[in-house]
Image (cartoon, grey):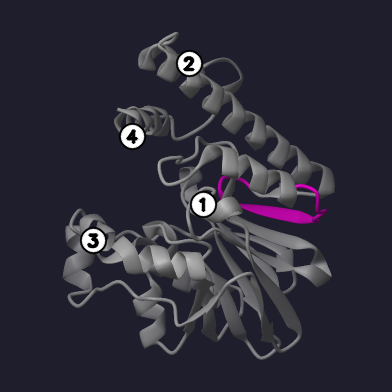
Amino acid sequence: MSTPTPNIRELHESVFAVVGPEGNTNFGIIKGDDGSALLIDADIRRIDEIQTAVKETGCKEVRYLFNTHENFDHSSANDYFARAGATVIASDGCWQALQQDGEAKFAEMTARELELKQRFTDLKMGMPEITFADATTVHLPGTTTRLVYRAYGGKSHSKGDAVAIVDEQHILFAGDILYTDVHPVTIYGNILNWIQGIDTLSQESFSHVVPGHGPVAHGEAAGKAAFSTFRSYLQDFHDHLGELKAGSASAAEIEAYMKSGQYADLGKTWMVKRNIDFYRKEAS
């Protein structure tokens, strides 16, 4: 596998975002004074990139791995890091989702990655070892991070949605509750619940907001604008799905609309059709 140079953004001397190329998953690294790290999300397909980032940020070991939710691109390296001695943490909702159908989805995703299976012959899904209902706190020497469950009504973007907040520096790792500059994946969630969750989260103020996918928002104003823009996108898409259900617009018309105008510059355009097709299947 090719190993892209990690795009590391230093948000503070001990807090880093690893921004995924072309809107792929973002990861977070929070470094303790002793060189230990809290890693936020990890995709086994990008393990070399992640390991390089851990080393380049001055960390000696990953002591904790936090899954913001259950999707493969955020949780597929659980077993890898657990074997290396890390403790995997997630919300109860994430644990329940992985328990329910995580193995089937893991097998489906890894079946597409022949090179991955050849490299990791005993690759398997790893379950979180520590879970929380509402919130918990991770302490490393010199830094404290709050992990907070934010799946409004039990399902926003997904069942397991949780965020990481470094209170002292006012830094938020939002997971897939927030996307910036790319079309989101909506097939796992409930859009109206998602909007409610955004409304709650956007009332807080942060110096940096790291989305699950897309560029980091730097500054309080930029963070609030990112939430507002994404909320408008979700509401607009939901309203147009209502038109599809009512028969007043076709799937093709909605797809064309969501790829044009104010959304013309968003990346991951293939997500639009995927989201619409899933909605049609579920509604039928």
List the residue tagged with mark 1.
Answer: 155
Q: Which residue is mark 2?
A: 243
Q: Position of residue 70 (x, y in %)?
A: 43, 61
In the image, residue 168 above or below residue 26: below
Give the x, y percent position of residue 41.
Answer: 50, 66
Apparent side of residue 205 relative to residue 192 in the rendered image (left or right): right
* Residue ID for mark 3: 104
Neighbours of disc 1 within 10 Å: few (<14), some (14-19), many (20+): many
- N-terminal of the two: label 1 or label 2? 1
Which stretch did the figure color magenta?
A: 202-215
**Amino acid residing under circle 4:** Glu
Label 4 SS: helix
Residue 282 occupies which quadrant of the picture? Answer: top left
Q: Looking at the image, which is closer to me, 233 or 3? A: 233
Counting every numbered tag in the picture gives: 4
What whole-number distance in Å separates the C-alpha atoms at marks 3 and 2? 33 Å
In whole angstroms, how far apart are the C-alphas of marks 1 and 4?
16 Å
CB-based contact (under 8 Å), mark 1 and mark 2: no
Q: Amino acid at mark 1?
A: Lys
Note whether residue 86 is visible.
yes
Mark 1 or mark 4: whose residue is earlier in sequence: 1
* Badge 4 density bin: few <14, some 14–19, many ≥20, Cα 10 Å: few
Q: Which residue is mark 4?
A: 282
Q: Is residue 179 visible?
A: no
